[in-house]
Image (cartoon, grey):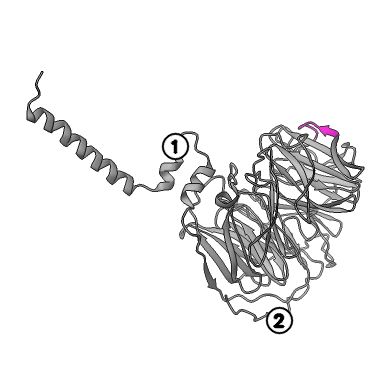
């Protein structure tokens, strides 16, 4: 059959027009939106495509001034990574006015990112939805005014909140890990950026299901992260950003929402991390893997971090019917091994988000149990000593120990003060201190000032017996 010229021309014109329309559509759509709709594409793939552009940050100075105040809460779970405030300011055992005094409050982007505090400064990793940027904000502990912020552009969509990690700060540096695994190190006082990196691009990390929840550590002059991917754990020089060491990851364990915990055992300082697939301790000196185990880590989702106890014991918990386990380290002929001492079912103790606290030979935590989510005290054999009962529940809220007291916050911002004692649940005071929802961020307590937040607001409360004066403001702003 012989085709006429017109019969050939019409399909050719249609093909050309269709191609032009497709090209026009591709140039108009957002790359992140296209990538997010691909079947079986996770957050990591979206991140890898979207973040091939150079990371360039912006510094903005604010009117705030650091407070002249003692004490520090310099990282997730405080100075010793144990969830206990160790400063000497006596705390009130009751609130005569019915509620602690609110010293200041600020609005934040959606999320669960708590505060780190040092030298009268409060550091919070926030997300600026209007500017589509992660923002590390430095605030005055005295009045909450912003001293400076450093931000970089990144597209973050709502995913059960946005920011959820806590910076780590030393006398010289502050380091942070953003929701899509960007990491940075700044001068803790001036906000000058020393470096800004992408763990996905540089170390093959996979962004966890609900964005990064891992909180970094500072060890002297080194920043410690657990990217998973190409390296289970890495140490970077805080000033230069150069790789000091990396710990191998032969089984390809991925990043979880858990954080690295420092530990000492058999004369060795180590960092303990629970990745998706297993748990390991690596040498703080050179990153050598000292021990590992698959007895914990092969679970659906890990959010709580390991609780470090005495005598080489670690208590690990998770939610979603995972329960908990007590691990025991042993050293023989220079080799460290980990084995399971006992395991608790989810009805005995499990924790969806918060990390239990080891205080004076007992464990305290809010457990998952048929959605009761009550406060419990356990001995070190896993036996329940007491629980707060079905009428005193706390959801997924945080807690800390200070001056022999337990501060426990529920989902809606109801704060409970109780004695931290194995002799029973002894509540002392209770007050509604936040009016929002999802008040899940870990707390910070410095110089009698308790920092809490819900989904969009942070408050600073006076919980001291007699609040130390803030003293004169420090004017040391020079900018980068």
Where's residue 188, x and y in %?
66, 70
Q: Nearer the viewer, residue 364 or 252?
A: 252
Where's residue 61, x and y in %?
55, 74
Q: Which residue is mark 1?
A: 38
Q: Residue at x 62, y 48 (%)?
A: 438
Secondary element type, mark 2: loop
Q: Residue at x 78, y 73 (%)?
A: 468
Secondary element type, mark 1: loop
Query: Can residue 99 be seen by looking at this rendering?
Result: no
Q: Quadrant of the C terminus?
A: bottom right
Q: Residue at x 46, y 59 (%)?
A: 130
Determine whether, in the image, residue 297 is placed left or right of residue 61.
right
Query: Can residue 115 be seen by looking at this rendering?
Result: yes
Q: Nearer the viewer, residue 432 or 48?
A: 48
325 versus 241 height, above or below: above
83 versus 36 height, above or below: below
Nearest to N terminus: mark 1 or mark 2: 1
Determine whether, in the image, residue 3 is placed left or right of residue 233.
left
Q: Which residue is mark 2?
A: 472
**What range is drawn magenta here?**
341-348
Q: Nearer the viewer, residue 439 or 391?
A: 439
Where's residue 455, x and y in %?
59, 52
Q: Quadrant of the N terminus?
A: top left
Observer-side mark, 1 or 2, equals 1
Where's residue 87, x and y in %?
83, 65
Contact between marks 1 and 2 (CB within 8 A): the answer is no
For disc 2, the neighbor class at 10 Å (few under 14, some 14 to 19, many from 20) is few
Q: CA distance from mark 1 to mark 2?
A: 56 Å
Magenta span includes 436: no
For disc 1, the neighbor class at 10 Å (few under 14, some 14 to 19, many from 20) is few
Q: Nearer the viewer, residue 28 or 118?
A: 28
């Amino acid at each position: 059959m012989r085709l006429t010229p017109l019969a050939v021309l019409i399909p050719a014109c249609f093909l050309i027009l269709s191609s032009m329309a497709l090209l026009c559509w591709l140039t108009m759509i957002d790359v992140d939106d296209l990538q997010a709709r691909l079947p079986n594409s996770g957050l990591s793939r979206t991140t890898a495509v979207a973040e091939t552009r150079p990371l360039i940050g912006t510094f903005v100075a604010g009117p705030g001034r650091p407070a002249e105040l003692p004490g520090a809460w310099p990282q997730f779970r405080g100075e010793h990574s144990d969830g206990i405030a160790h400063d000497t300011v006596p705390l009130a055992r009751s609130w005569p006015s019915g509620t602690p005094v609110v010293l200041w409050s600020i609005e934040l982007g959606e999320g669960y990112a708590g505060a780190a505090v040092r030298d009268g400064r409060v550091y919070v990793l926030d997300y600026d939805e209007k500017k589509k940027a992660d923002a590390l904000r430095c605030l005055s502990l005295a009045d909450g005014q912003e001293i400076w912020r450093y931000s970089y552009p990144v597209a973050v969509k709502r995913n059960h909140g946005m920011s959820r990690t806590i910076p780590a700060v030393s006398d010289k540096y502050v380091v942070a890990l953003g929701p899509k695994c960007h990491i940075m190190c700044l001068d803790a006082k001036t906000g000058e950026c020393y470096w800004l990196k992408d763990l996905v691009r540089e170390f093959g990390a996979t962004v966890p299901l609900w964005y990064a929840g891992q909180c970094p550590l500072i060890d002297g002059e080194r920043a410690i992260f657990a990217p998973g991917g190409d390296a289970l754990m890495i140490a970077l020089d805080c000033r230069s950003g150069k790789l000091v060491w990396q710990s191998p990851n032969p089984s390809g364990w991925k990043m979880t929402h858990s954080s690295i915990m420092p530990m000492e055992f058999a004369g060795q300082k180590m960092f303990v991390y629970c990745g998706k697939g297993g748990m390991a301790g690596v040498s703080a000196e050179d990153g050598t893997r000292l021990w590992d185990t698959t007895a914990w880590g092969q679970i659906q989702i890990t959010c709580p971090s390991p609780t470090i106890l005495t005598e080489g014991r670690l208590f690990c918990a998770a939610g979603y019917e995972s329960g908990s386990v007590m691990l025991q380290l042993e050293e023989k002929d220079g080799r460290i091994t980990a084995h399971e001492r006992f395991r608790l079912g989810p009805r005995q103790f499990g924790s969806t988000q918060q990390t239990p606290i080891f205080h004076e030979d007992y464990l305290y935590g809010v457990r998952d149990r048929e959605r009761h989510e009550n406060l419990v005290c356990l001995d070190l054999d896993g036996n329940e000593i007491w629980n707060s009962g079905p009428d005193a529940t706390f959801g997924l809220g945080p807690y800390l120990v200070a001056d022999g007291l337990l501060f426990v916050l529920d989902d809606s911002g109801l704060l409970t003060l109780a004695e931290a004692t194995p002799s029973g649940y002894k509540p002392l005071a209770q007050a509604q201190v936040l009016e929002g929802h999802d008040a899940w961020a870990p707390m910070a307590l410095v110089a009698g000032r308790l920092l809490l937040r819900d989904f969009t607001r942070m408050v600073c409360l006076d919980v001291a017996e007699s609040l130390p004066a803030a003293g004169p403001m420090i004017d040391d702003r020079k900018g980068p």
